[in-house]
Image (cartoon, grey):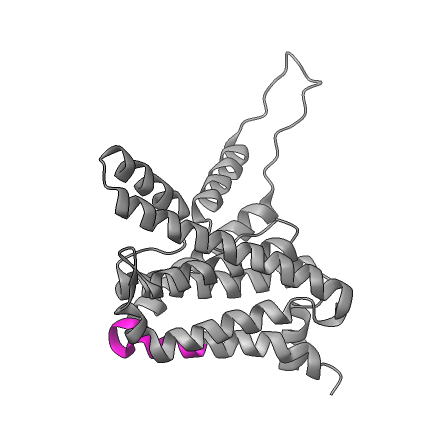
Amino acid sequence: MPIQYLAQLTSPKRTAQANLHLGVTLASIAGALNAGGFLAVGQYTSHMTGIVSSAADDLILGRLIPAFAAALMLCAFVLGSASTALMVNYAKRNTPHYIYAPVLLLEASLLIVFGLVGTSLRQHEVITVSFTAVLLCYVMGLQNALITKISNAEIRTTHVTGLVTDVGIELGKMIYWNRDKVNPSHGEVVANRYKLRLHLMLISAFFCGGLLGAAGFKYLGFISTLPLALALVALSIAPRFKSV
C-alpha cells in the first residue's frame, strides 16, 4: 500500500532500497528548488562551492558587501545542517519512531512559506541578499544533512559535483583492463556497480527535478513549491498511519 511504502522511506530501520528511493525523491526536490530558486532570486542556493568562491573573489576585488552576502548564505546552509543534526538527535532519544519527521515537517513548512509569501520576501534584503535566498539556503542545508544522516553519508542530494566525480571513478574502474601478470598478487580492479547506478540515478533525479522546478516557477510562480511541500508532509506523517 502507498502509506506502507512511504513509511518505509523514513523508517529508522534502513534498507539500501529505502535509501535509494528516498535519495531520489529528495534529490528531485532539491533540483526543483535549486532551479526554481535561481529564477526567483538569480542564485543557485545549493551551490556552496560557487558561493564560497564568489566570496573569495569579492574580497580580493574589494567588494566587501557582496562577500558578506555570500558568507550569509553559507551560514544559512550551515545553520540548516546544524538544525537537522539537533532535531534528529533529539528525536532519537525522545521519539524514536519518528526520527526524521520533524525535519521533513520543518522543510515542508518553510516551502509553504516560500510558496505563499515568496514574492514579498524577495522584496526584502539583508546585505543585498533577499530573504528568499537565505531561506532556500537554509532549506538546502536541512535536506542535505537529513539524507546524509539517514543513509550514513552514503547519499547526498545537493552535492552533484561529488556525485559526478564518483561516477567518473567507477567508470574508470569499469574500463580498467586488469592485466597485471607481473604482480598477480595485486587485487583486481572492480567497479562498484551499485554505487555507479545510485549516483547516476541521483544525478538524473536532480536534473529532472530542476526541469520541473524551472517550468513550475516559469508558469506558476512561487506557488509551484506547494506540491513539493505536500510530498514532504506525506513522507513525514506516513509512519503515523503505518499500522492503520
Position in image of residue 92 (x %, y %): 74, 63
State the residue at coordinates (61%, 34%).
Answer: 190
Please check the rendered image and state whether residue 223 is part of the magenta-colored stretch, yes or no.
yes
Q: Quadrant of the N terminus?
A: bottom right
Q: Relative to 53, is 105 above or below?
A: below
Say whether residue 205 is visible: no
Magenta range is 216-227
* Outermost residue toward the top in this view: 182
State the residue at coordinates (64%, 11%).
Answer: 182
Decide which of 96, 163 is in the foreground and name it: 96
Residue 235 placement: quadrant = bottom right
Circle count: 0
Q: Relative to 184, is 137 above or below?
A: below
Position in image of residue 81 (x %, y %): 54, 55
Please check the rendered image and state whether residue 81 is part of the magenta-colored stretch, yes or no.
no
Position in image of residue 65 (x %, y %): 27, 47
Q: Assign the magenta stretch its main secondary structure.
A: helix
Residue 113 placement: quadrant = bottom left
The reply, left or right, for residue 174 in relation to residue 15 is: left
